[in-house]
Amino acid sequence: MFDSRIAATLRRALLRAIPTVLGIVILNFLLLQLVPGDAADVLAGESGAATAETMAMMRSHFGLDLPLGQQLLNYLNHLAHFSLGYSPRFNMPVMELIWSRLPNTLLLMAGALGLALVLGIGCGLVMATWAHRWPDRILGVLSLLLYSTPGFWIGLMAVVLFSVHLGWLPSDGSTTIGANLSGWDAVRDRLAHALLPTLALASVFMAIYARLTRAAMLEAQTQDYVRTAVAKGLHPARVQLRHVLRNALLPVTTVAGVHLGNLLGGAVVIETVFSWPGLGRLALEAVQGRDYAVSLGVLLLSSFMVIFANLLIDLLHAWLDPRIKA
Amino acid sequence: MDTTKPARILHAAAAPRHSATSTLAPRSWLRRLAGPPRHAAAHAVDADGPAPATTWRLFLRNRAALCGAVALALIALLALAAPWLFPGDPLDMVAEPLLWPGQDPHYWLGTDSLGRDLAAGIAHGARASMLIGLAAAAVGLTLGTLAGACAGYFGGRTDAALGRLVELFQATPSFLFMIVVVTIAPPTIGVISLTIGLTSWPTVARLVRAEFRALKERDFVLAARSLGYGNTRIIFAEILPNALPPVIVATSVMVATAILMESALSFLGLGDPNRVSWGSLIGSGRDMLRSAWYLTAIPGGAIVVAVLSLNLVGDGLNEAFSPRLRGRA
Amino acid sequence: MNAPALLDVRGLDVHFGRHQAVRGLDFSIAPGETLALVGESGCGKSSTALALMRLLPADARLGGQILFEGRDLTTLPAPQLRALRGNAVSMIFQEPMTSLNPVLTIGDQVAEVLRRHQGLTSGAARRRVLELLELVRIPEPQRRIDDYPHTLSGGQRQRVMIAMAVACRPRLLIADEPTTALDVTIQEQILELLDGLRREFSMALLLITHDLAMVGQWADRVAVMHGGEIVEQGSSRQLFNGARHPYTRGLLGASLGLGAAPHYRAERLPEIASSIDPQTGARGFTLVQGRPTPFPPPPAAAAPLLRLEELHVRHPGAKPGTHAVDGVSFEIARGETVGLVGESGCGKSTLAKAILRLVEPEAGRIVFDGAEVSALSGRRLRPFRRQAQMVFQDPYASLNPRHSVAAILDAALRAHGVDVRQERERRARRIVDQVGLPTTALARYPHEFSGGQRQRIGIARALVLEPALLVCDEPVSALDVSIQAQVLNLLVDLKRELGLSYLFISHDLSVVRYIADRVLVMHGGRIVESGDHRSVWERPQHPYTRSLIAAVPAPDFGARRGGYASRAGGLSRPICDTQSLTVHESQAP
């Protein structure tokens, strides 16, 4: 019964995802069309000189002179073959380009989300347990401040403090260039480089989860079943953890799912601040350099990522809440 | 960034003040949103116990929320008065570059690497931030409320269609979407506000939809239907006033989010190039991070103050609207 | 009483901020006895129950002493208090639907209390849980032990709560309105279960309720509460046969279903009015027993006002084939009150909504005043809507909190074509006066009124258009007994003044018996019995009707305890003689 409920949720979620995926693809394609000029113009501009004939040749080479419907079909066809086009600026297939940068961004995002969840829920638990007393007040003020601060600014200030003045942590890139480290040293080096960006990215989400956990727990504490648990003579810690927190986690997981898109957006800025070689910086460079194939490819892929992650969240939800029907 | 408080349904705690004129005169929409002075019905056996304070009074009693409101008012004042306090273009080079704050009494916040007055930048930046924040929130609110109300009230296929649309918008990472849009269209304030509004309407729509779905089943809506009221009247006159409290709370969060998003955008250099905003100040100050870090710190501090005030006000509104937790049976 | 009291409460005070919910309470419970704490809403009985187990919220202040087996619970340190809870003293609550944790299985939740107090291993605990589930008569305990609460019905959840409460053989079980949220047939089973367990475990039972008939059947002793104080206590026989305090007598008089079976054409219900002397602050009670309203004889052989023919209504959002209303046909004549009785889920609310075209019927006809309305829609329904209106159950949810009373009435009149403002104001003032509210009520908002007053406003809204038919969907079920009497009297008065016909829907048989001319019994979407108000009670034909009547609690002081024998129609003889209550009695407490 346990498994059939999860399987049914999975099936339902997949079916729901398909039209969304299709919608995103079409949206991307339309955005592509809205771009002023086309790739041929860009290439011509970059190469410096182009005659009408070479432009026409480039157009037909890239299939840019075909009717719209045909172009859409070609686009879909390419997608089906896992090709996102070719980047004129970087001179390689977009897919390959994205693939090389993806792990770095995933590392950052996963680290940030994990940190945010653990620290955030932990703080929220403390705040709810000592509600209205000084641990709650102090943590409440801190989380409010963190919530109100732009992540990139925290990153910058952290660089000023830890890199410039204290010199404890590096401020650029994901590894120290030139030093051929291996084994533990390499891992430590990577961690040192990743710490500040991850913290900066996680900051605002930490605050969100802390506040949300606190609110959800305070709400759960007023419920009847908590009164029943106390009437049974259970220890307050057990009531908090087993009865209150368990129910309070449900809204937190819902919100966490929605944040995946925001996490990616935040990654763009953080990666810029720390010169982190990830997908976000790639998107920014592509946008500034008018390399639409890359930027739209990143948009498309990240949308897919978000949909996939939401699927996982749906499953997690079905597992946590037995009221969700098969 | 989403609202962090779970949406709460107002439990009949707010209603307008007395009218001194005819008792049947309809109350204005805005006045109805404020809380009433509650009368203890002297001859009634009131099973609810003592009267709770009104929504306004609750809000005003909350000191933190009050501080936030005052700070917001000051920022708004600064934004409005900027052209008079700091006449001219804030992007003009006016003084010696890289003056630290306090070095020169004329430029008490210092200057940047090109000799531009930081204080002027902050004041004019306030205009840009507030404008975009309000415009984006207005777009998001309008779209979200309309969509959510229709989906929640009519249900069925309207609801399913909206659900799909919301999923579509939420699957696209909003910031990436924004970046792509500002390269296609010119990054004017209008475009930026519109785009931020487009990314924030799903949150409002979900809130409003949840409220409408719950309120639609209430007896007073059934009574309205049995009296023969049309759908439009029921949506706008019966349900919407009751559905507004969580939306009002969400508005402050939306403005805050819009300010943060705009600052990130202009930090990356993708904002309106002709306007100064706090984010662009941080972006241009970044090159001097190691030596003149005040160029990044001060505009960032301004953002923090503005967003913090909005959040304090939002929290205060949430506390004022949510029902008193009385555990007694 | 020579045996020392199990629970001895002395001078209990409970304060919530400035409001005092309980004052100077003194009572005791002996081992193995059932004490009922009776009162209307807001009298402090639930606060008392929570105070006994120290479950009140943190902002409540306690005064006085609560001596349980000699130890004062008000000063007991927290760890010892926790050792007592669920172990020596247990509690079950009013709302079984929300009292269980939705994300844990019922087996886990019952085992939790066993493992906490008796330190059982999980295997031993599981065995014990199965025994307990059988004891409380949950069907198929082997399967149900791993189910989640949302798969159980309200009655079953309450049984699980009882299992949790008696798991460690407590000496005292506090039951706070344990059956208020349940159907009357389930109610009987739960109370019988509680009584059986009480005798088996020699447990004392503190039963908190507002239902006097239940008290008469299941309690040994009774304490009546009002305004945070006990106004009278004694054995239940004493109280029912010769109550001394005017409030108790008023309550007994106003309660239907205690044996006497008045009818609205023959007598009015007595009303209790409480007043506070401005100088001394003492509370006084006045009992008002008015004279019955004279009714003209019903018109001979006129066409029926409402006729339903084979009405079928589907459950909203359900598959075709399942019907909430399954082929219902009946008539309502002009000036008649038809009572519709049934338990929850029988389809009576759906029927009410279908009649008013708030829900679309799948098949069948509705003929109102000769015109078929089942086929109309939109604007053409307007005239029908003016003629047929509804009064709802929940006075707190049926009025828009954002609209003043005047706005509510004005909007209704305007929507039905009364364009002149003075005319609307005049009609609003008139109807507010007719429902017994002052004209100052017009400017106020719903939250400023009590439950009974809000129900009057709801009635005013329904009647301001001067309809011919009023559908009342459980209009008094959410009200206290004393307010119930007032609203029922009001409905009777309005019926005569305005020449109304009623469809009165309720699950409470005693109320329907009082207010209806003809009674229909509904079960599973169908009308299973119909007859005039006397014959349905005295000669019920359908077995469902008989089981319904048998399940109604009646104060017989334990005559039926130990398994209920079915009675062949008719209630026991009247216990309380309402004629002995003279008009305008008052007495300071």
Image: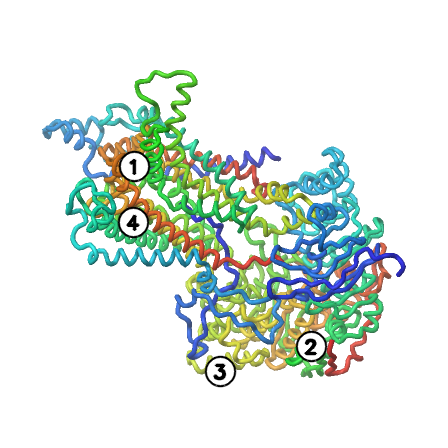
Whether residues under marks 4 and 2 lie with C-beta atoms below 8 angstroms apart, the answer is no
Residue type, mark 1 in image: Phe
> Which residue: 44% across, 62% down?
B60
To which residue does mark 4 refer? Answer: B194
User: What chain does badge 2 belong to?
Assistant: C
The crowd level at tag 3 (other Cα within 10 Å; few <14, some 14-19, many 20+) is: few
Relative to C240, B227 lies left or right: left
Residue type, mark 4 in image: Leu
Between the residue at mark 2 and the residue at mark 3, the CA separation in whole angstroms equals 39 Å
Q: Position of residue B295 (x, y in %)?
A: 26, 42
Q: Nearer the viewer, mark 2 or mark 3?
A: 2
Between the residue at mark 1 and the residue at mark 4, the CA separation in whole angstroms equals 21 Å
User: What chain does badge 3 belong to?
Assistant: C
Q: Position of residue B69 (x, y in %)?
A: 38, 58
User: What chain does badge 1 belong to?
Assistant: A
Disc 3, SS: helix
Between the residue at mark 4 and the residue at mark 2, the CA separation in whole angstroms equals 66 Å
Residue pushed farthest right?
A: C2
Between the residue at mark 3 and the residue at mark 1, the CA separation in whole angstroms equals 65 Å
Whether residues under marks 1 and 2 lie with C-beta atoms below 8 angstroms apart, the answer is no
To which residue does mark 2 refer? Answer: C282
The crowd level at tag 2 (other Cα within 10 Å; few <14, some 14-19, many 20+) is: few
To which residue does mark 1 refer? Answer: A29
Rendered view: A27 above or below C487: above
Discs 4 and 2 share one subunit = no
To which residue does mark 3 refer? Answer: C426
Between the residue at mark 4 and the residue at mark 3, the CA separation in whole angstroms equals 51 Å
On the question of residue B116 being in view, the answer is: yes
Q: Nearer the viewer, mark 1 or mark 4?
A: 4
User: What chain does badge 4 belong to?
Assistant: B
Disc 4, SS: helix
